Image: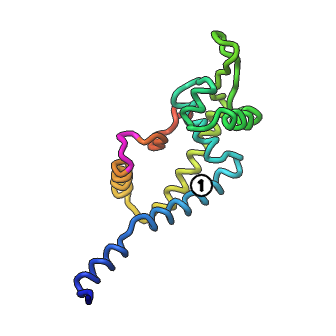
Amino acid sequence: MATSKVETRAVTTSVDNLLLPLLEHLVRVGRNAGEATLAPGGLRPRHLIALRLLSEQGPANQQGLADSLSLDPSNVVGLLNELEERELVTRRRDPVDRRRHIVELSVLGGSELCLAYARLRLVEDDLFSALSAEERATLYDLLVRAVGVSVPPCDVAEEPSTCPA
């Protein structure tokens, strides 16, 4: 059976308007630029997420942090060792349960987090330079709606609370 011009046009239009290839491209370019801009500070995305959680939620026990990060506890220990070695977090024994450790963002960790987010903001400004502020806000709202949550788990619209004014 022959395909009509209308059917061919509908298929071509739907293929031309696929979002996933565009989103994948933006993610790839953004990830590469983000990692390059974070490299001088030695932070990787997983470091940034852990520091952000501690900034927003305050001190946490290691198990709670592992749960929040959706990581195996042994991987969290390695992550925290890296952050503690750089003095970005502190770990202390829980006075209530000496078997547990409490992890807290250090002053230096807060400063590094602010610097990293300032650098990432520049990457984002470059990546979305073709969009107006209103269009970027609309894109953000649409992506939040597409993800299906009212507040994204790693919302970076606001400065972390540890950033100096």
Quarter occupied by residue 52: top right
Q: Position of residue 3 (x, y in %)?
A: 26, 86
Q: Nearer the viewer, residue 79 or 109?
A: 79
> What secondary structure is the stretch in magenta mostly built from?
loop
Magenta stretch in the rendered image:
147-151
Q: Is residue 137 visible?
A: no
Residue on which the image places disc 1? 34
Q: Position of residue 116 (x, y in %)?
A: 61, 45
- Callout 1, which amino acid? Gly
Query: Label 1: few (<14), some or many (≥20) within 10 Å?
Result: many
Q: Nearer the viewer, residue 92 or 75?
A: 75
Image vertical order of residue 8 relative to residue 158, above or below: below
Element class at badge 1: helix
> What residue is drawn where x is 35% and y is 46%?
148
> What residue is drawn where x is 65% and y is 32%?
73
> What residue is drawn where x is 36% and y is 74%?
15
Quarter occupied by residue 77: top right
